[in-house]
Image (cartoon, coloured by chain):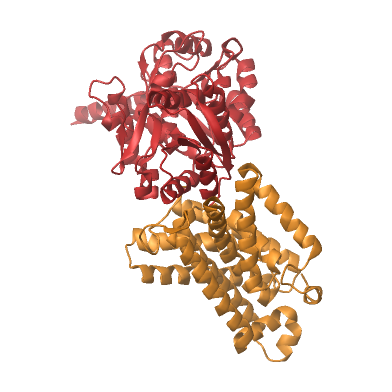
Chain colours: A red, B orange
Amino acid sequence: MLSIINVLSIFFLSFLLFSPVALAKEPFKIGAVLSVTGAASFLGEPEKNTLVMLAEHINSTGGINGIPVEVIIEDSKSDETQAVLAVKKLLEKDKVLAIIGPSTTGETMAVIPIVTNEKTPLISCASASKITEPVKERYWVFKTAPNDYSAVEAMYKYMKGIGITNIGILTITTSYGDAGRAALKDMSGKFGIKILADERYGPKDSDMTTQLTKIKASGAQAIVNWSVGPGQIVVTKNWNTLKLGIPLFQSHGFGSKRNIQLAGKASEGVKVPLGRLVIWDKLADNHPQKPILKKFSTDYETRFKSEPGTFGGHAYDAFMMVVEALKKVGPDKKKIRDYIENNIKNWPGTGGIYNMSANDHCGIDSSAFEMVIVNNGDWQIIK
Amino acid sequence: MSVFLQFLFSGLTTGAVYAMVGLGFNIIYNATSIINLAQGEFVVIGGLMMWYFSEAMKLPFFISAILAVASTGLIGLLMERLTIRPVKKSDLLLMIMITIAVSIVLRGILMFKFGKDPYTYAPFTEGEPIHIYGAFIQQQTLWVIGITLFFIILIFLFFNKTMLGKAMKACAVNPVAARITGINVDKMVMLSFVLSAMMGAVAGIAVTPITLMEYDRGPMLAVKGFCAAIMGGLGRGRGSVIGGFIIGILESMTAGYIHSGAKDAVALVIILVILFFKPAGIFGSKTIADLRRF
């Protein structure tokens, strides 16, 4: 009898002794600075959700080589000063190995000098090309979002193919619209496209028929709207009301099923350059991105009851790059940076197939986009 | 011609939205001299509640509309009881500050309840937009204009022909004198908040199919509606409506004939010029404005 108790107590004691050791392993710390609230919350919210979900998943399946990962998410409130403070806090107090984010271009530009000084890899989720260029000055900086220029390039290539050369552009007066407007203007010469009308509207405007009427009167063959938020729905509805007889192109910000639902029948025929995350179910089964997109999309939707959208995907790619680097080279900032630069090759992510190199810290181009048309309340890839 | 007409219709559409929000400001102002800067949030609550009852709970149109107006009225009542009444004796400016605080709190609650996404539902009448001389106008815009006109008449009759309305007006002009004549000032103030919240809710219900509605649309609606109200003359129902349409059409014409990037700035400059020559607004009287405390 006594022996049984002894055996049992030894058994339980060993449990008490060994399990804390496993738990007490110092976790890998990864920082994230995201615009969870404020003007850019449409970016930061899905990004935050994505990181929370991924971290839980990794820790519940044994961590990275048996070591748990701790993601410390700071809300930058869509503000550059807050982003700088958050990065300083992550570096000085939490001593993170790498930082994901910030969500917007302005915030990213503000924190680049700090991470460069502290020699910590930063993987931004924002899109402007100046984040990773000139690449020599961006030794520690990467990004997973495609350049603004890539979406425009995909759209212009398609326009050229169907003989559209004169367009009118309509952009929102926020940083998203400003970046899109600059890209649309800069790229037009290269593709021989003429911008006949350049109209704008505020983020809370309720009627854009004036701008659309002007674009039509300018003789444009197509309208390009570049915005996020309710404005793009209002434009779609107005375009449908006016029966202008010229196609409407939207930016990749339109890439959510919710937008089709909100605009209803008005959205039929709208053309959009989209990353493949939104249209994963329309891809061929042998597409290298399909398994990742399917898993991420369905996991996210079951957990948060909403679509991750293209933006959640940027955080996914950034996080998975860091995780893979940690798995291969361990907790060393310099080695993590080198790994991402040299070993992320033909790497299928949600944003595209990444090819990082010493000359390219973004790794994807316009091939990351597909031209998509809204047909019967669903996306359809234009072949 | 058709281009000009289209610009005009676009202006009427935005103007109708501003006019309706502007009307709500007048009710509280007429009863208390307070400018309620949470008026925009009432509009948002009306629109979102309508979505909740008609789309999420799948209730019939009229029941949803009544419930949306009633629940917004209740929020107006709570706002007055919890935030305005306890400090009633103090400075008018302080109370206006309180309404700003309430608007921030309401926005926070709305964000938690409804998230950051925009919402919409089907317009009141389905069907093709109306075609006039080569220009198009949405049916919903006509609804908004119609409802606005209906409410101006209703508000005019209420404040000028009914005892309750006249009593309410008296409270704003001189609360002490009103109390001496036996008017229950507390009740009137409370009633004005409920009525203007309900007015805001009606505006929200009517404009949501055009503009969509999300938690943070309130401040913009309040600013434009307030501009409409001061332009027409604070306290004047028809003033705020005409002010709203003037601002809407000015914005649209500026966007059409100058540039869409300049529309807010040009419209605002013209408003300033008008107020420079008529400080009490187009329909406001200077003598009355001088008598008011604010």
Q: Please tell me which residue is depicted at 66% across the width and 70% down the height of the picture.
A: B239
Q: Is residue B143 visible?
A: yes
Pick the residue in front: B174 or A364: A364
Image-quadrant location for residue B120: bottom left
Single out the residue that lies furthest toward the left: A1
Side of A4 relative to A298 (left or right): left
Q: Could you say where residue B183 lies in the image, as x and y percent from the top left?
A: 66, 88
Q: Please tell me which residue is depicted at 75% across the width and 70% down the height of the picture.
A: B90
Q: State whether residue A80 is above or below residue B100.
A: above
Q: Could you say where residue A322 lies in the image, as x and y percent from the top left?
A: 44, 19
Side of A269 relative to B40 (left or right): left
Q: Point out the image quarter for the C terminus of chain B.
A: bottom right
Q: Please tell me which residue is depicted at 48% across the width and 61% down the height of the picture.
A: B141
Q: Could you say where residue A230 lies in the image, as x and y percent from the top left?
A: 48, 47
Image-quadrant location for residue B78: bottom right
Q: Could you say where residue A100 lies in the image, as x and y percent from the top left?
A: 50, 25
